[in-house]
Image (tube, grey):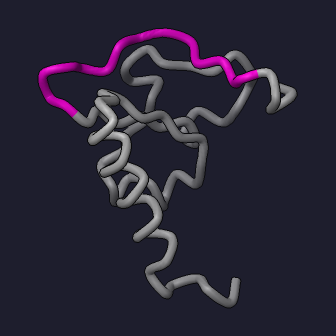
């Protein structure tokens, strides 16, 4: 909390999105605060037919396309085994 509103989180998100783009990723899905991530272009994933394999609040699952030539695909996102979900 002592680092909130310092810009560190926004810088980290922007850096992660830029790195994903450089690596050739076309899409990013986040599970997070619904009032935070839209400032980076994220929208409700369910509007694109994207869901998780676990129950989460609909507004907390968001998606973003990094390349307009590749629209968001519909489907189910599954966490990797180390997450234990």
Image position of 82 (left or right of 63): right
Looking at the rendering, in which quadrant would you find the N terminus?
bottom right
- Residue 46 lies, in percent from the top left, at 47, 23
- Residue 4 lies, in percent from the top left, at 58, 82
- Residue 12 lies, in percent from the top left, at 46, 65
Residue 85 quadrant: top right
Image position of 24 (left or right of 61): left
Front-most of residues 2 and 12:
12
Residue 64 quadrant: top left
Q: Please report the residue visible at 55 percent of the width from the left and 36 percent of the height from the top.
A: 61
Q: Please report the residue visible at 33 percent of the width from the left and 55 percent of the height from the top.
A: 40
Front-most of residues 1 and 47:
1
Residue 82 quadrant: top right
| Range shown magenta | 67-80
SS assignment for the magenta stretch, majority:
loop
- Residue 20 lies, in percent from the top left, at 37, 41
Q: Is residue 35 magenta?
A: no
Farthest-out residue, right: 84
Farthest-out residue, front: 23
Q: Please report the residue visible at 87 percent of the width from the left and 28 percent of the height from the top.
A: 84
- Count of numbered labels shown in the rendering: 0
Q: Please report the residue visible at 26 percent of the width from the left and 36 percent of the height from the top.
A: 66
Tell me: residue 84, above or below residue 43: above
Image position of 80 (left or right of 84): left
Farthest-out residue, left: 69
């Amino acid at each position: 909390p002592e680092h909130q509103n310092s810009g560190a989180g926004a810088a980290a998100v922007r850096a992660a999105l830029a790195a994903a783009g450089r690596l050739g990723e076309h899409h990013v899905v986040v599970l997070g605060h619904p009032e935070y991530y839209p400032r980076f272009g994220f929208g409700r994933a369910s509007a694109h037919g994207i869901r998780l394999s676990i129950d989460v609040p609909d507004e907390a699952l968001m998606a973003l396309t990094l390349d307009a030539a590749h629209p968001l695909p519909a489907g189910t996102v599954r966490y990797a085994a180390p997450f234990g979900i």
